[in-house]
Amino acid sequence: MPLYEYELLETEAACPMCPGRFEALQDLGDEPLSHCPDCGYRVRRVVSKVTIKTRSAMTAAKAAKKGLTTWKKTGEGRWEKIDGPGVDAIVGSPEDVAAVKEEKRQTRDIT
């Protein structure tokens, strides 16, 4: 069963009972949660890290054959493609990099 991550909607007040994000173990066919089971505030499911288990080692070349792209972080807000379809590089704007830093700082302050 997958472990899904949820976060409070921005329109909701900060929850005193949970850190703003939580995980829920659900079946693949289950509907996404709409409210936090602890505080009742509205939530949305967010994309979090994905783990793919295979019987053999997954190389960038094998992933590309399956239509997946492998990226390598080369700096703050910079990613270069190792193999697979898509653009050769992703470069975040200074505003995006600053926003991610601020979001990470706020997340650390919550816990």
Image (cartoon, grey):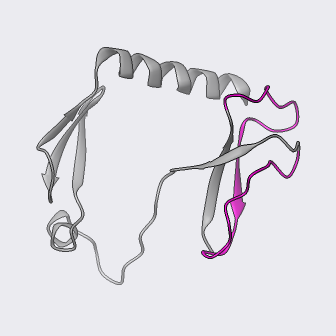
Image quarter where the C terminus lies is top right
Quick one: which residue is furthest to the bottom in this view? 55
- State whether residue 92 is above or below residue 81: above
Quadrant in the rendering for residue 31: bottom right
Who's the residue at 76% across and 30% down the image? 12
Taking the magenta stretch, the answer to whether it contains residue 47 is: no
Magenta: main secondary structure equals: loop
Who's the residue at 28% across and 26% down the image? 92
- State whether residue 48 is above or below residue 95: below
Give percent across and percent down for residue 87: 13, 45
Q: Is residue 69 left or right of residue 107?
A: left
Residue range (magenta): 10-38
Who's the residue at 21% across and 36% down the image? 90
Give percent across and percent down for residue 39: 88, 42
Quadrant in the rendering for residue 97: top left
Give percent across and percent down for residue 76: 30, 25
Image quarter where the N terminus lies is bottom right
Give percent across and percent down for residue 61: 14, 67
Taking the magenta stretch, the answer to whether it contains residue 20 is: yes
Quadrant in the rendering for residue 64: bottom left
- State whether residue 90 is above or below residue 92: below
Who's the residue at 35% across and 84% down the image? 55
Q: Is residue 76 left or right of residue 20?
A: left
Q: Is residue 77 left or right of residue 60?
A: right
